[in-house]
Image (cartoon, grey):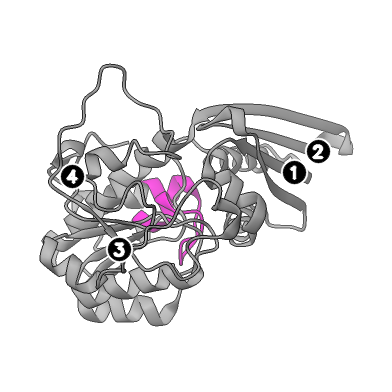
Amino acid sequence: MHPELGGYRVTDIEPVVAFDVAANKVGRDLSEAIFAPPNMAYRLPDGEVPLSGATVQMGPVHDGMPSHLADLVTITDRDPVDVVAALKASGVEVMLNCLPTGSAQAARVYARAALEAGVAFVNGMPELIVCDPAFAQEAEARGIPIIGDDVKSQLGGTIVHRALIEVMLARGIRIKKTYQLNYAGNTDFLNLTQRGASKMLTKGEALTSLIPYPAEVSPAFSYVPNMRDRKTARFYFELANFSNAPVRFDATLEVEDSANFAGTAVDAIRCCRVAQDRGVGGVLHAASAFFSKHPPRPISDLEAAEQLEEFIAGVRER
């Protein structure tokens, strides 16, 4: 969304350390591990990824490897590394958390390691870590920027659904019922169908927080293996306009899921680096509201966009 942000381009982001638990990824250079199954992200035609020099290290498992993914991922027999020590040794500045939904324990291990190592933290998955007041206070006390929780994709279901809700409210349309059905064929969606409670929470609250009266709001997920990384989101509304006359709205969005996530992640990562340059720690509220489904301070996307530009320009501290 920002080819240049605070003096940094996307190509200025250099991966220096990575963690996984899969036997076909741990121990390999990151440039090779990213193409190992079951990864299936969109690949730029004729694009080449040079060796990164960053070897994927064995992370702590905890609840990060649910049994329903066992047919797709084999856990390596290597011992987990000391994450804090690995972060410090790598010189990493920003950590991006992309653990499977439902990995509450494992996510907090990595979040805690980031604080201990003095590393900025972007929580890309739906575990309420940045929204935890104690975690946020400690991050601010340590001068560590944090953004979260649960990334909104560049043009994903949440941001589109929120925009539809806002235009309906602005036009005086009464929202009676709405649902958002998301389906894809990657491991994220296989996992969501089994333990998507936290994603249902963050996605649902991202929508209901905009509607100033009771309405039926239902996000849902389905796993369709042959769709691979292509995600379809369907938006359905039952509405009423003048004189309570019935209105129905139905729309569909199709995207490459991983690239859609990355389009937001690269901006969030650079916002953390800009905050580090300025000596600002704690929750970056403008960035969290714009980039995340469940920020500590939810506001409209238009207001969040304005505040983010103020942050980038240095007018707003956080």
**Disc 1 target residue:** 178
Three-letter amino acid code of the residue under disc 3? Phe
The three-letter code of the residue at mark 2 reads Glu
Query: Relative to residue 130, is residue 75 depicted above or below?
Result: above
| Neighbour tally class for label 4: few under 14, some 14-19, many 20 plus, Cα within 10 Å | few
Circles 2 and 3 in contact, beta carbons < 8 Å: no
Query: On the rendered structure, is 52 left or right of 126?
Result: left
Asked whether the residues under the numbered discs 1 and 2 touch, taking CB atoms below 8 Å apart as contact, a structural biologist would say yes
Q: Quadrant of the N terminus?
A: top left
Q: Earlier in the sequence, mark 2 or mark 3?
A: 3
Q: Secondary structure at mark 2?
A: strand
Q: Is residue 282 visible?
A: yes
Mark 1 and mark 4: span between their CA atoms? Answer: 39 Å
Q: Nearer the viewer, residue 13 or 45?
A: 45
Using the image as rendered, state which of residue 162 and residue 253 is in the foreground: 253
**x then y, percent, for residue 217:** 73, 51
Q: Mark 2 packing: few (<14 Cα in 10 Å), some, or many (20+)?
A: some
Whole-Å distance between the Cαs marked 1 and 3?
A: 33 Å
Q: CA distance from mark 1 to mark 2?
A: 6 Å
Residue type indicated by callout 4: Ile
